[in-house]
């Protein structure tokens, strides 16, 4: 049986922060979730869970988002 890893409170804070940054960035550029996912070549259902803070983004999702964010100068500072 495979155990589901649990997130610490600290991890939840970072996940929610990332979620807020992604949502704000997408909305500031006037993109729907579908538009953003199409540009980043990522699965919409998985990405929606990331935006809602329900799921950690995979390395693949982060790599896919990176070119879109770099092109439009997303800052996560």
Image (cartoon, helix red, strand yellow):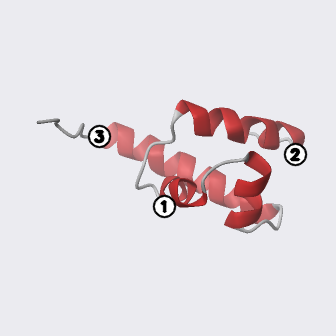
Percent coordinates x, y for residue 13 in the rendering = 41, 45
From what the image shows, is residue 33 above or below residue 70?
A: below
Distance CA(mark 1)–CA(mark 3): 15 Å
Q: Residues within 10 Å of mark 2 (few under 14, many from 20)?
A: few
Answer few, some or many: residues within 10 Å of disc 3's Cα (few below 14, many 20 plus, some between 14 and 19): few
Q: Nearer the viewer, residue 54 or 15?
A: 54
Would you name the residue on which mark 1 appears? 52
Q: Where is 19 relative to 66, above or below? A: below
Q: CA distance from mark 2 to mark 1?
A: 22 Å
Q: Is residue 54 visible?
A: yes
Q: Earlier in the sequence, mark 2 or mark 1?
A: 1
Q: Mark 3 or 2 closer to N-term?
A: 3
Q: Position of residue 48 (x, y in %)?
A: 54, 60
Judged from this view, the residue extending furthest toward the right is 71
The part of the image, by quadrant, that contains residue 72 is top right
Question: Do the residues bearing badges 3 and 2 touch, measured as CB atoms within 8 Å?
Answer: no
Residue position marked by numbered label 2 in the rendering: 72
Q: Which mark is residue 44?
A: none
Which residue has dot 3 on it?
7
| Quarter of the C terminus within the rendering | top right
């Amino acid at each position: 049986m495979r155990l589901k890893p649990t997130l610490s409170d600290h991890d939840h804070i970072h996940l929610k922060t990332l979620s807020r940054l992604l949502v704000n960035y997408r909305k500031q550029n006037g993109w729907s979730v579908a538009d953003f996912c199409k540009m980043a070549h990522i699965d919409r259902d998985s990405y929606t869970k990331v935006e809602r803070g329900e799921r950690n983004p995979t390395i693949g999702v982060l790599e896919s988002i990176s070119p879109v964010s770099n092109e439009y100068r997303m800052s996560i500072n």
